Amino acid sequence: MTPYTYEYPRPAVTVDCLVGSFDGHRMHILLIQRDREPFQGSWALPGGFIGIDEPLEEAARRELAEETGLKMEKLAQFRAYGDPGRDPRGRTVAVVFYGFCPWENRQVQGGDDARQANWFPWDAVPPLAFDHEVILSDFRGFLRREVKVVPFGQELLPKKFPRSLLVELYTAVLGDRRVGEELAARVVRLGVVVETSPPARGKVGKERWYRFDLRQYRVWQKEGFPLVGSGRGSRKTSTRRKRG
């Protein structure tokens, strides 16, 4: 035994990936159908075991690419799940990452130990393996809170979009059109999105078109939106914990 070897039992460490997309009306989640036991034939989040010398985020990107063909550079750490009974193979701790994929880049294909990969609407997800239903439920709750306090949608909407599409996105996440309308109006007031010219091609009608102001997007992403009623110019933020 070397001086750096611990005598304690060591759980296996895995990574799982929550990848969301938006088709213009509904939010979708990317799932794979397992081709191995346990839970062979069941749907699950993409993921797997990390390599001994592999950083966590790198492992998440690798597993996502191997099992779905989807390559994503931008993933953020969500939470860790370590209930002793979560995996029938033994003690595992899963570190979960999340990211968002534009709908036009949604092409996926099962690979490695995934029989197939597919997108499912959030309200039509099949039974999931392991504790992945809990993970997905936690993530949806997290996102419903998150969109109210920081900018959201840059990865999901086109460069130019009508206000109605912004409302649809927020409604899809929040499950409430009235709140979606209010939130869309608020991000316009805060300058997260600004009015722009309509696209050169296609039918645009009379609706106003917007784009994200990336400078303001980053400002509010760092500081958090001001509390309701604190004034537009206030930098007083929500009680949300800031990211490092």
Image (tube, helix red, strand yellow):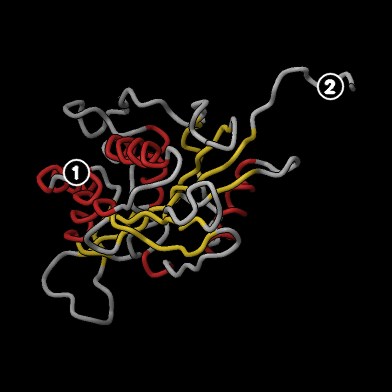
Residue 7 appears at what percent x and percent y? 77, 17
Tell me the number on the disc at residue 4.
2
Report which quarter residue 65 is drawn in: bottom right
Residue 70 appears at what percent x and percent y? 52, 62
Residue 34 appears at what percent x and percent y? 50, 55
What's the residue at 44%, 48% (across, down)?
A: 18
C-alpha distance separating marks 1 and 2: 52 Å
Tell me the number on the disc at residue 243.
none
Name the secondary structure under disc 1.
Answer: helix
Report which quarter residue 139 is drawn in: top left
Residue 141 drawn above or below residue 62: above
Nearest the camera: 27 or 67? 67
Q: Give, as a three-letter code, the residue at label 1.
A: Leu
Nearest the camera: 199 or 33? 33
Residue 94 appears at what percent x and percent y? 54, 36
Residue 100 drawn above or below residue 23: above
Q: Give, as a three-letter code, the residue at label 2.
A: Tyr
Residue 56 drawn above or below residue 198: above
Q: Residues within 10 Å of mark 2 (few under 14, many from 20)?
A: few
Residue 127 drawn above or below residue 195: above
What's the residue at 39%, 32% (across, down)?
A: 223
Nearest the camera: 110 or 240? 110
Name the secondary structure under disc 2.
Answer: loop
Between discs 1 and 2, the one toward the N terminus: 2
Report which quarter residue 131 is drawn in: top left
Q: Nearer the viewer, mark 1 or mark 2?
A: 2
What's the residue at 49%, 29% (across, down)?
A: 85
Tally of numbered tags: 2
What's the residue at 24%, 59% (across, down)?
A: 195
On screen, residue 203 versus residue 60, left or right, reads left
Tell me the number on the disc at residue 183.
1
